[in-house]
Image (spheres, rainbow, N blue to C red):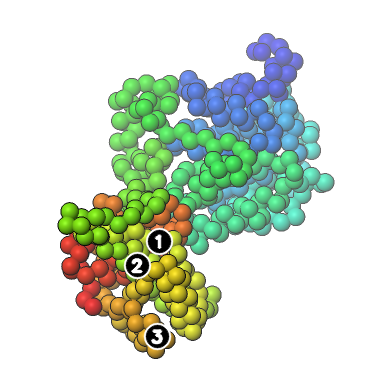
């Protein structure tokens, strides 16, 4: 390959691995790791198979996927005609374009073998490159830019790469996460064609982030593609890049360099790290598949079972208003007190006051058909006072009012943490996803109505149930 240009060109056009290790050898400072070979293999083996790559900081993922692969995808056997690379910001887009241009302008062997790459003055700019020898195009854009209807001559994008289109700030709220997901699904993917390839590169910043949603779609067979996940140390304690970190001391030096355990866990170990002030952690959540029959105690007494429904009513249906939330739970007596089984008939929607009353009546009748008389738990504050009164006027007398005292919303939720962590509060396997989302990410979600209803339900349990603290007075 070194002596014969024809052999070299033939091999590197066919193999991205040879292309990268030959023309981008200046990036290869350590022995290539197995995980890097897997990334390279999946990049070259198909021209239309979607690929999601999550790898630790400094692993070379962006160099391989965003800097080298787009050029090979055009000059090599895949023969792409229009490549778009997305970054989160304009400054990141500008940096990626500079990296691409530097290789095409300064890599003499690449130019000599596969060039020329010169373009017209208006195209060889900060946002696009047009290859004069193939008339293919690479455009780099930010997620803020609209690409609707974007074409290069008759070609729609046939390779789309998204590199770090999320950050901590954009994943903090459900609204921000939905915005990124809807941007990808509603604007980016439709910009391509039937055989367009999508590649997404980044880190796991949130349980509900874009990358986690894409992972879920692939794992559940709702979408095609490959999801790759490479932390610096795998589950067996083995370093994935022994060429760069040959000993445990080398890994430890890298960890100390970060100077921040959260950054190490998030950027290198690829763990989703909660904020320091997180009230409830996701690994504390315990699930149940079915509710057991009542316990029979030694005295022959059958355990008490009671349904309570925590309600956090709103008074408006406007698009910016809070939701009216209703969280039902079954109090299940055990020898040491009570467990609470959260029931899946959870309601979370915008509704008027009359609609809230009607919904309570329907819930009440629904449980009565099952032989249960549920108790509604409502805070005795502000406008919420009207709901218990109205329900009693409607003939529903199983209403309990609570007073929060001086505790704020987060404090009330924090007081449920030990009960959740110890498994005294259990959640259904399906049907409580929004509730869990709100209590796990309380403080960063746009809405917290379900979390408030949940806390109201839990703290309504009276002091005669010793395993649960009495927080409210009623």
Q: Residue furthest front?
A: 300
Q: Which quadrant of the rendered structure holds the C terminus? A: bottom left
Q: How many marks?
A: 3
| Image coords of residue 366 (percent x, y) | 46, 71
- Residue 342 visible from this viewpoint: yes
Report the residue at 45% width, 74% height from top: 365
| Image coords of residue 48 (percent x, y) | 69, 36
Q: Residue furthest top?
A: 3
Task: Say what secondary structure mark 2 lies in.
Answer: strand
Q: Residue furthest bottom?
A: 393
Query: Between disc 1 and disc 3, whose residue precedes?
Result: 1
Q: Residues within 10 Å of mark 3 (few under 14, many from 20)?
A: few
Frontmost residue, 112 versus 205: 205
Mark 1–mark 2 CB contact (< 8 Å): yes
Task: Identify residue for label 3.
Answer: 395
Question: Where is 405 relative to 252, above or below?
Answer: below
Task: Say what secondary structure mark 3 lies in.
Answer: loop
Mark 2–mark 3 CB contact (< 8 Å): no
Q: Nearer the viewer, mark 1 or mark 2?
A: 2
* Residues at marks 2 and 3, CA–CA distance in whole angstroms: 18 Å
| Image coords of residue 303 (percent x, y) | 25, 60
Report the residue at 63% width, 50% height from top: 141
| Image coords of residue 455 (percent x, y) | 31, 67
**Splitting the image into 4 quarters, where does residue 136 fall?**
top right
Q: Which mark is residue 240?
A: none
Q: Which mark is residue 307?
A: 2
Task: Identify residue for label 1.
Answer: 343
Report the residue at 31% width, 25% height from top: 248
Frontmost residue, 454 versus 14: 454
Q: Nearer the viewer, mark 1 or mark 3?
A: 3
Question: Where is 264 relative to 300, above or below?
Answer: above
Query: Between disc 1 and disc 2, whose residue precedes?
Result: 2
């Amino acid at each position: 390959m070194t002596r014969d240009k024809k052999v070299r060109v033939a091999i590197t056009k066919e193999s991205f691995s040879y292309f990268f290790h030959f023309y981008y050898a200046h990036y290869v400072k350590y022995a290539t790791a197995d995980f890097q070979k897997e990334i390279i293999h999946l990049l070259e083996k198909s021209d239309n198979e979607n690929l999601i790559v999550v790898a630790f900081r400094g692993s070379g993922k962006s160099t391989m996927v965003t800097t080298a692969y787009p050029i090979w995808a055009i000059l090599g056997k895949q023969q792409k005609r229009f490549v778009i690379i997305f970054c989160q910001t304009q400054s990141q887009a500008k940096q990626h374009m500079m990296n691409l241009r530097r290789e095409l302008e300064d890599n003499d062997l690449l130019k000599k073998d596969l060039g020329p790459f010169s373009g017209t003055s208006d195209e060889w700019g900060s946002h696009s490159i047009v290859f004069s020898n193939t008339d293919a195009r690479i455009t780099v854009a930010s997620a803020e830019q609209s690409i609707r209807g974007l074409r290069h001559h008759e070609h729609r994008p046939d390779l789309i790469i998204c590199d770090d289109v999320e950050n901590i700030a954009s994943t903090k709220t459900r609204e921000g996460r939905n915005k990124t997901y809807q941007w990808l699904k509603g604007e980016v993917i439709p910009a391509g064609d039937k055989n367009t390839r999508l590649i997404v590169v980044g880190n796991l910043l949130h349980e509900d982030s874009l990358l986690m949603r894409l992972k879920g779609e692939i794992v559940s067979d709702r979408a095609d593609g490959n999801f790759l996940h490479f932390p610096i140390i795998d589950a067996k304690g083995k370093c994935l890049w022994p060429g760069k970190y040959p000993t445990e001391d080398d890994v430890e030096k890298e960890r100390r360099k970060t100077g921040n355990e959260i950054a190490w866990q998030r950027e290198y170990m690829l763990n989703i790290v909660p904020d320091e002030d997180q009230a409830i952690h996701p690994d504390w959540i315990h699930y149940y598949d079915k509710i057991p029959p009542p316990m029979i105690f030694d005295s022959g007494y059958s355990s008490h079972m009671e349904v309570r429904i925590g309600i956090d009513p709103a008074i408006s249906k406007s698009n910016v208003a809070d939701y009216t939330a209703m969280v039902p739970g079954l109090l299940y007596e055990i020898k040491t007190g009570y467990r609470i089984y959260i029931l899946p008939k959870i309601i979370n929607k915008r509704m008027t006051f009359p609609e809230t009353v009607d919904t309570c009546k329907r819930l009440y009748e629904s449980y009565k058909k099952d032989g249960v008389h549920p108790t509604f738990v409502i805070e005795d504050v502000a406008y919420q006072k009207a709901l218990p009164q109205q329900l009693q006027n409607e003939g529903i007398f199983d209403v309990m009012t609570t007073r929060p005292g001086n505790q704020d919303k987060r404090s009330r939720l924090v007081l449920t943490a030990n009960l959740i962590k110890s498994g005294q509060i259990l959640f259904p396997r399906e049907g409580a996803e929004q509730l869990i989302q709100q209590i796990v990410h309380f403080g960063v979600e746009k809405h917290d109505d379900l979390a408030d209803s949940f806390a109201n339900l839990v703290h309504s349990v009276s002091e005669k149930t010793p395993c649960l603290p009495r927080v409210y007075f009623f």
